[in-house]
Amino acid sequence: MAEAVPVRCPACLRENGYIAPVFPCACGSPVHPPLDLAAPPVLLTHRTWSDSWVAVRCTACGRESEWPHPELGCGSCGTVVRLPVHPLEPPGAAAAEWGAGRGGTAGPSGPGRPATLPDPRGDAAAGPDATPGPDAAAGPDAAADARADAGAGGRGGGPAGAPPDVNPSHTPLPPTAAVPRPAFRPVTIRTARDAVATAALYLRWLGFQDVRQPDGRPIPSAAVDLRAPGLVAQVDPTTAPAGLRAVECVWLNGLTASATSVYFSLAGYTEDARSRADALGIPLFVMDLTGMPQPVNDPADALVGSGA
């Protein structure tokens, strides 16, 4: 586990320990936002969707992905701060460095292309007063060889005259879109058992495997547990909003099992329950009678975006 770094609260000046979260890249390697410890934390007074995400590049495959921006709640006064992160390098920076290492210049013709590339049109295009270059003096065969060498230097042995490749094999590839999941097919909720079944289907759609639900016995009117490897979920099929105690209970169950805690409710949540879920990082979902769960807080949005 990564070591905690000290973060001073700008409101009460208390130091809090913070451990940067680790997220799974599509290639399987762990990635985490690169914290900028030299910059002070920013007091979070207004949350927007765009500011809640940060681009992180995987050091293993070069893929860029959007992950939740690091935030920390002060354990003394409750102030929430957003931690600065180092910005990503421009997409062309690595390619420009690659071209400079091969003796070329990054200009309009692309990184890695030689600065002294002869004009393929010959001296006629340069005008009547132009001085013939060494390639022209050596004859057409030498000029053709020079153009072939330029093409090979720009593409690593590609066909002559082809444009240089700005993405050689050892530089980071451009970001690619995440593999889309098929659309979730909701199940109409008519009974409490339908609500539990819908939550189980939705968790499997998110990527959780072997989701277990009560089977062969009637569903009680109270909340029902769903379990899977690394998951503890609570489904509340009642008509009353889930309260603070219910959210804290599912958090404690997940903490005991070292698993992710998730809550589903048909009637929504009280203000206290939503505030505590945000502080504890518990994803909250609300289900309507059409059977389509909807995220109601930032941890739920993050879970839908990243999957299990």
Image (cartoon, helix red, strand yellow):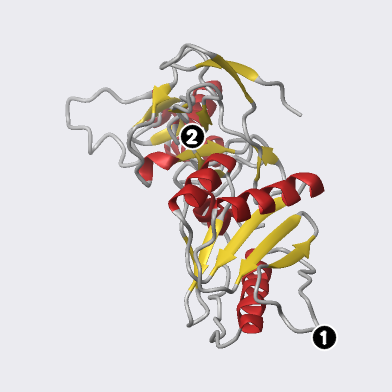
Q: Split into 4 quadrants, where in the image is the C terminus? A: bottom right
The residue that mark 1 highlights is 216
Locate residue 298, reporting x and y percent: 48, 49
The residue that mark 2 highlights is 146
Q: Residue at x 48, y 34 (%)?
A: 146
Q: Residue at x 47, y 17 (%)?
A: 9
Circles 1 and 2: CB atoms closer than 8 Å: no
Relative to 305, is 91 above or below? above
Q: Split into 4 quadrants, where in the image is the N terminus? A: top right
Q: Quadrant of residue 118?
A: top left
Locate residue 189, reporting x and y percent: 55, 84
Locate residue 102, reporting x and y percent: 55, 25
Return the residue nearer the eye: 82 or 278. 278
Locate residue 158, reporting x and y percent: 57, 47
Return the residue nearer the eye: 169 or 278. 278
Label 1 Cα neighbours within 10 Å, binned few <14 / some 14-19 / many ≥20:
few
Return the residue nearer the eye: 111 or 79. 79
Q: Secondary structure at mark 1?
A: loop
Q: Horizontally, is 44 left or right of 188 in the view?
A: left
Badge 1 or badge 2: first in the primary sequence: 2
